[in-house]
Image (tube, rainbow, N blue to C red):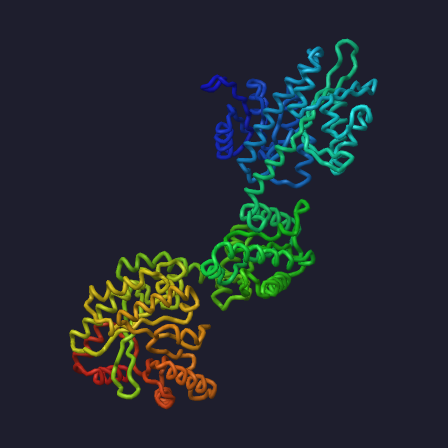
Amino acid sequence: MQDAKGTSRPLVLIVEGEVEIRARAEEEMTAAGFRCCAASDAAEALEAFRRERPALVILDVDMGDADGFETCRRLRAEPKGAELPILVVTSSGEERDIENAFAAGASDFATKPIQWPLLRHRSMFLAQAGEAFRRLQTTLIGLAESERRLSDAQRLAHIGNWQWLVERNEMLWSDETFAILGYERGKTPASWNGLIDAIHADERGPVEKMLRASVRAQRGWDIEHRVQNQRGDMRFVHHQGSVDIDPLTGERRVLGTLQDATDRRTNEEKIRRLAFFDSLTGLPNRRLLHQRLDGMLRFARAQGRQVAVLFLDLDHFKRVNDSLGHAAGDRLLAKASARLVESLRASDGIYRAQGSSPNHVLSRVGGDEFVVTLLLHEGPEIAAKVARRILAALSPPVSIEGKEISVTASVGISLFPSDAENADTLMRFADVAMYHAKSSGRSRYQFYTKALSAQADRALLIQGALRRALEARDFQLHYQPQISTQTGCVNVLEALIRWEVPGKGTIPPGEFIGIAEETGFIEQLGEWALHQACRDCREWQRRGLTGVGVAVNLSPLQLRKQEIVEVVRRTLQSTGLEPRFLELELTETALLQHTAEVAQNLDQLKAMGVRLALDDFGTGYASLSYLKRIPFDSLKIDREFIRDLESDAGDRAIVAAIVAIARTFGLRVVAEGVETASHECLVREEGCEAMQGYRIGRPEPLAQVLRLAADHGASSHQLTTGWSERETA
């Protein structure tokens, strides 16, 4: 059969029991330029071979009850089967499977899961090499007069040939055979021992055994192995041969070819590196991790052993990328991965299949995500020990572009078989545990529990429901009063988001705000809250509360966007609210990210007339220099320092210090979490200008705010009285 250009295309026989894999193989081989025929079992394979005479066979040896290796041997025994290139597909790359494949007569092998680019590459090479061998064999037997031209062709094609007259033990090598084996013609005689001695020491015994068995059985072979010369240079060769009887003398004559396959193997290794290894760190990637973890679990299941999967994520890595650039981030990743490799020891119970390097127990599976796989020889404490060593190895600062960067990580641990029995679930559970470690304060490790999985499932449900909830208007704003400690008047009502799910009750803000920030949905939710709060404020002002403003929280993600200034301006214009009645609250966390952009946005908002408050002061990591650089109007003392104000002298000292700092910068101080009469008295004594909390009033929906305004008049003092009366009732 020829293609549209008249070029003959080689025929490949695909022997595969699974319909999906067989169809995929036909698709890949057709794309590679082959014609295809297929068989689903051994009997069909032999029938198809006799009928079609393919140039190549791809044989899956895992065919249910059938012995795939026996099928390979039967194909080899067929007329013309000795010359047939056979690529065997095995379920693993274990040494036993490889030996069985070559013993059965395989030319090459591939392992599952199949890497289709590699399979196409190897198939094309085997088909071309098989055709070259057939042509060369014909030339050797019938065209002795063309020996000079043949030698030139062999040299150009890097193909050498040899003959062995067995009974006389006479050997003939072509010039290219001498070159491939690393011998110099005239100094080293052609001999069987010379051929065997040139084979790499690690493969010499099995290859010689196979060659001698083929000669005795008068059958051909088609294998790949390494050769190494006396200087230590190593080459890969594709070695084919056949045995026949000389028609004139009746002697056995062995004909062989050696094709230098080093360049092809080098290209295959490049393909494999691209497919299985991370280009930045050189560590195995997610695909190779899954392949090796599957092998580890099979071994552990057979031996009754435990396996630990450690999923770790570098903390705050995004800040390095955002502040120093991706090149600096890449250097940090490279240094972190080197430290991780150094922290792993053989005594940790590390599983290494097929002589894997120590790096192969550590994989990079994402931007700043790594996985360590351990075969536990004792108990789970080994996994905890490794996690502690990893955290310690990462803790020293890393120097990047002249800056000392602190590196920490959060580690999640799952166990086989107690947590899960397959690779995908173990990875997912370790990931769940890692996120819990991160949310619990970072730079720590966490074992997986079923309770964590329930939390993760709920978080996933919340994530999916967020967008639908906004479209369905399931979110509401409730307002909590903030009053002056001097006059008792309400100055500001803080807008707090509430999510009421029909039929399921209220979802606390602590559950969905963090998820909204992680997914980026906080921008849309925050913009809605800003617009709704400004509109509500304008409404209560129209109802008589003319001096009462509204406070709205901004997330760090919103604040670092340049669009926030325009969003606020557009919102004020559309609602008609004066800028002086809008107070924007931000946490210290926002100041740690993109400080230049944040400061610029805050300057523009301040110039617009909007008031600015620093929320939860004292619990974050913001430098006091921010109070000088950023034009805040208020500091809000976190409720953590107010809760034990009556009994904890340290909390009173902190509150006094915050008040003194605020006065230095001309800032108004608001105490949050005022819940008792004693709290109220003490914050007045310490000099706080305003206070907020359940003692003053709980958050209420807009309808209740308007009802209180109607019942108690326009006075913000009377409004406070109404709120207090409602609390008492």
Residue 453, how many percent across, how many down?
Answer: 47, 60
Residue 298, how many percent across, how many down?
Answer: 61, 47
Q: Is residue 417 visible?
A: no
Residue at (72, 28) in percent of width and height? 180
Residue at (42, 84) in percent of width and height? 655
Q: Residue furthest top?
A: 248
Residue 545, how many percent across, how many down?
Answer: 19, 78
Please tell me whether residue 591 is drawn above or below residue 648 in the rendered image.
above
Q: Is residue 199 visible?
A: yes
Side of 533 where 24 appears, left or right: right
382 vs 258, nearest the viewer: 258
576 vs 646, nearest the viewer: 576
Please tell me whether residue 565 is drawn above or below residue 637 in the rendered image.
above
Residue 505, picture quadrant: bottom left
User: Dividing the image into 4 quarters, which one contains the C terminus?
Assistant: bottom left
Please tell me whether residue 717 is drawn above or below residue 577 in the rendered image.
below
Side of 651 where 469 appears, left or right: left
Please tell me whether residue 678 is drawn above or below residue 82 in the rendered image.
below
Residue at (69, 56) in percent of width and height? 346
Residue 193, how many percent across, how many down?
Answer: 81, 28
Q: Residue furthest front?
A: 402
Side of 566 where 306 appears, left or right: right
140 vs 329, nearest the viewer: 329
157 vs 202, nearest the viewer: 157
